[in-house]
Amino acid sequence: MTAESIPDRYADPGELDALSVVIPVFNEEAWVRKCVEALLSAAEVANLRLDVVVVDDGSTDDTPAVLDELVASTGIRVVSQANAGRLAARRAGLARAQEPWVLLMDSRVLVDRGSLRWLRQQLAEHPGRRVWCGHVDVETAGNLYAAFWSGLVKIGWRRYTANPRLVSFGAEEFDYFPKGTGCLLMQRRLLIEAIEDFDSLYDNAQLASDDTRLLRDVASRERIWLSPNFSFRYHGKPGARGFVRQAFFRGTTFVDGYLGQPGVVRRVLIAALAAVAVLGAVTLRKPAVGVAGLATTVVAVPSAVRLSGGSWREVRSAAVLTPVFIPLFGAGVLRGLGLAATRARRPGGTSVQ
């Protein structure tokens, strides 16, 4: 199948003249308004009709009041549910989406003003390019923690971040390019099919990798496109407490996203686990070896960020936060391995080989 081919099982949704947008939100009273306003502005530039569905996933702050105001002023639709996680919220939003094209967005992601106009032209000229991940620029000014995550992206996906350009990738190149469901556009039918086929290594859906694992399946069906012209800006949460939770959580979702999946990251994960096991065994007898290994990693990460084109702000954050990140992320990985093993041991459980 070529990059421009269209599988028979997906009906042609036609040109992009209307778009459903599904935004799950949990305790984001300050950001959901900005997200919706930026979206409406971009749609106006693109002369694009929007069907916006915001799913309030059990917010306990003033998010419901903000959403009521947005309903009155903009005409968006709101679905409210008990807290069940992002994947469940997206399912609820998709069930109510009305257009053949759907954009998934997170509430801290703001679409750039010209992005939807550019994408509308792309789809008109190249109708086979039907799955798009947004190019994400992380707002790092004044946010040490966001700069850290941005620096890690520069290391892992330097094939693109070192030279942002129009590219596409399928399942075979999947590990080499940035991707995520925080700003993802595709036809509604394909997205529903991918979510219905989604199968985590874990029993708890709230801990599942609902972006990497789901998108790998999408990439096996159609190529995923990426361009700096389809751009978004992400505003990460500030604060040490949020960083601790996120590092631990990402360790867990990392296992679900890559273990049992083909690709270079899976091989690196397995090699890293083996190296940690060996280092741990040696450290029990010679603690100085463990200290030296940790010190080497602490130095290597900011160096890798710099060599991958990271800014000095990203390098500085890597130097400060790597010693904190390693044990938190590692603990999350161990939790993920435990959750996967628990499910695999049950009759009919998912294999993690």
Image: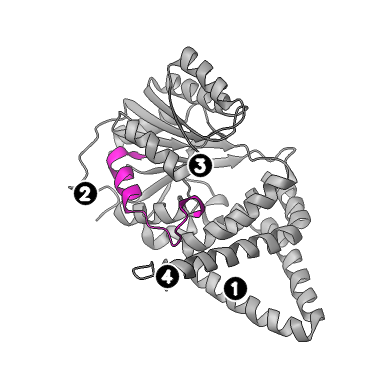
Q: Position of residue 232 (x, y in %)?
A: 53, 36
Name which of mark 3 and mark 4 comes first in the sequence.
Answer: 3
Compute the Cα span from label 3 to label 1.
Answer: 29 Å
The front one of 117 and 148 is 148
The front one of 326 and 347 is 347
Q: Position of residue 116 (x, y in %)?
A: 43, 29
Which residue is at a point 64% across and 65% down the rendered structure image? 330
What type is the residue that disc 3 sits on? His
Name which of mark 4 and mark 2 comes first in the sequence.
Answer: 2
User: Circle 2 — which element?
Assistant: loop
Which residue is at a point 56% across and 76% down the rendered structure image? 271
Label annotation for residue 154: none
Q: How many marks?
A: 4
Q: Nearer the viewer, mark 4 or mark 1?
A: 4
Disc 2 target residue: 7
Which residue lies most toward the top here?
73
What type is the residue that disc 2 sits on? Pro
Mark 1 touches mark 2? (CB < 8 Å): no
The front one of 336 and 254 is 336
Q: Nearer the viewer, mark 1 or mark 2?
A: 1
Disc 4 target residue: 344
- The segment highlighted magenta reads 186-207
Disc 3 target residue: 135
Name which of mark 3 and mark 1 comes first in the sequence.
Answer: 3
Which residue is at a point 36% across and 54% down the rendered structure image? 198
What type is the residue that disc 4 sits on? Ala
Up the image or down, 313 lies above or below 53; here it is below
Label annotation for residue 272: 1
Which residue is at a point 42% across and 39% down the rendered structure image? 90
What type is the residue that disc 1 sits on? Ala
Name which of mark 1 and mark 2 comes first in the sequence.
Answer: 2
